[in-house]
């Protein structure tokens, strides 16, 4: 491990030590040195913590002399001159991205925090890991070929980012001013201000649908903790500082989100988590629990050491309801004789699924027409567990069957290594795609790229031309 990696690990463990110190302090207890005795690494962390965080301000020294409890947060008057002496734990939100507690929102309560944690993780002891905490909505370079695109990293948060990406594309292609062209070229002229507007519009659209087109709730972080957690609740120094802002009108919500868009798109903002919290409170926890069925009890699950989105969360982002399945309507579980909830209505953005391992074992869920045929030609694609976006610029593609003979689709996988939007020509009527694939030997992935197979779940038998691009997905 290099020096930077060692420092990151030390700082992470310092943050863990500080977290427990906060818990003990809030209960009037002290974290004794005996708690970390025998672990040399944690002793080092303890020393680092003392060096960084116990530099006393003049006001605190006076408080000690007067016999006051200077360890209590309420006895520490704010001092801007002491900012340089305060230790900022890893993953903490920069002060500039925290809103004032007097802004007028509803403070997070311990009961609400427990319900939020439970509907996400199934318990109150799991918290978001580093991959989630560092994720935010980061655009590519303005006025470039990828100006419309969000940059993502592989991990659980990528699914959320790609659904928001699909709604950004919807806004830029179909919801901007009447003068805007519905072309891929029009999305290359997007500047930073238009990126902000597109992100605000995308977030608002998703939250408005989750709130059944009646309310939107936006979560922002304040500089002060709103409650003292219970001992059976794992502190994350983030959720405890939330305030909730509720709006009855969509345009008011959009204006508020746009005004505070830095809280979602700046590094260190925890922007993906903030949006996910906003989504849950817009839907309400009671409604989410009603949406779920016997197969799914929470929105995230742990896989390979990272929390990933369950289908219920993907459906909540796409349709506004946290139903756990991709088929149309309601089915029944024969073993338990209980209903299984699928998708009830078409949404603006669709969903396509392909997983080679599941196909090989005849376990691939069949996506229903509600998700396969959205109102607009934009799909979030789950391909072998990786999320991406497929879209067209012709808004009549899915409403006029003649348009589906020969057409173009565009593909973006969210990765910074993709420097250009991939253009695909789709031919559904000339001849069957398997006629070009007589060779039964060789790597099936090279013969039939997974992206092509994903598209064929919607247009069976389609011939797909990559237009000179080497198939990469």
Image: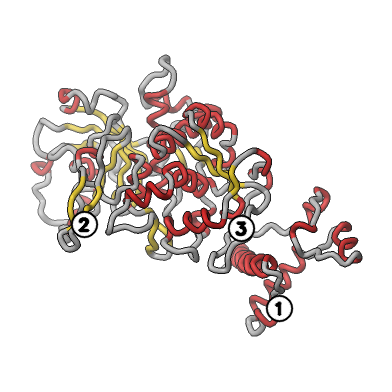
The dot on residue 32 is 1
Q: Position of residue 335 (x, y in %)?
A: 17, 63
The answer to whether residue 135 of the structure is visible from this angle is: yes
Going by the image, does 50 lie left or right of 266?
Answer: right
In the rendered structure, which disc, 3 or 1, sits on the residue that comes first in sequence?
A: 1
Residue bearing the label numbered 2: 338
Label 2 close to label 1 by CB (< 8 Å): no
Going by the image, does 136 lie left or right of 433?
Answer: right
**Mark 3 residue element:** loop
Residue bearing the label numbered 3: 237
| In front of the other: 34 or 407 | 34
Is 377 above or below relative to 23? above
**Mark 1 residue element:** loop
Give the alpha-carbon distance from disc 3 to disc 2, as whole Å: 39 Å
Residue for point 18% across, 41% down:
456
The answer to whether residue 416 of the structure is visible from this angle is: no
**Mark 2 residue element:** strand
Q: Position of residue 251 (x, y in %)?
A: 49, 26
């Amino acid at each position: 491990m290099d020096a930077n990696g060692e420092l990151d690990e030390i700082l992470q463990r310092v943050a863990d030590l500080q977290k427990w110190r906060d818990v003990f302090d809030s209960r009037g207890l002290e974290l004794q040195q005996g708690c970390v005795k025998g672990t040399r690494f944690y002793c080092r962390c303890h020393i680092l913590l003392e060096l960084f965080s116990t530099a006393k301000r003049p006001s605190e020294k006076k408080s000690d002399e007067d016999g006051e409890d200077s360890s209590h947060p309420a006895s520490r008057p704010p001092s801007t001159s002491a900012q340089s002496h305060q230790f900022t734990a890893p993953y903490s939100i920069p002060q500039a991205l925290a809103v004032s507690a007097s802004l007028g929102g509803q403070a997070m309560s311990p009961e609400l925090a427990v319900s939020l944690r439970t509907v996400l993780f199934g318990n109150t002891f799991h918290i978001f890991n580093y991959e989630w905490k560092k994720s935010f909505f980061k655009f590519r370079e303005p006025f470039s070929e990828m100006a419309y695109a969000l940059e993502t990293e592989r991990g659980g948060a990528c699914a959320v980012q790609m659904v928001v990406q699909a709604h950004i594309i919807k806004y830029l292609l179909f919801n901007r001013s009447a003068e805007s062209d519905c072309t891929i070229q029009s999305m290359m002229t997007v500047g930073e201000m238009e990126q902000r507007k597109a992100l605000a519009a995308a977030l608002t659209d998703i939250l408005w649908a989750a709130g059944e087109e009646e309310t939107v709730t936006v979560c922002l972080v304040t500089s002060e903790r709103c409650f003292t957690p219970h001992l059976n609740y794992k502190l994350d120094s983030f959720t405890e500082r939330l305030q909730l802002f509720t709006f009855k009108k969509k345009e008011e919500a959009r204006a508020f989100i746009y005004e505070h868009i830095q809280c979602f798109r700046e590094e260190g903002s925890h922007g993906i988590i903030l949006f996910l919290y906003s989504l849950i409170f817009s839907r309400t926890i009671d409604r989410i629990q009603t949406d779920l069925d016997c197969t799914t009890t929470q929105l995230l699950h742990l896989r390979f050491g990272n929390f990933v989105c369950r289908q219920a969360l993907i459906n909540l982002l796409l349709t506004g309801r946290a139903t756990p399945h991709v088929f149309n309507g309601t089915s029944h579980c024969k073993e338990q004789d209980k209903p299984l909830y699928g998708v009830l209505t078409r949404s603006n953005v669709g969903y396509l699924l392909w997983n080679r391992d599941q196909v090989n074992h005849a376990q691939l869920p069949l996506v229903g027409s509600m998700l396969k045929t959205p109102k607009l030609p934009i799909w979030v694609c789950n391909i072998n567990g990786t999320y991406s976006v497929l879209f067209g610029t012709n808004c009549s593609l899915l409403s006029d069957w003649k348009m589906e003979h020969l057409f173009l689709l565009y593909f973006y996988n969210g990765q910074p290594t993709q420097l250009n939007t991939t253009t695909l020509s789709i031919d559904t009527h000339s001849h069957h795609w398997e006629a070009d694939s007589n060779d039964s030997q060789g790597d099936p992935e090279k013969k039939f790229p997974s992206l092509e197979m994903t598209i064929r779940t919607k247009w069976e038998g389609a011939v797909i031309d990559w237009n000179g691009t080497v198939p990469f997905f």
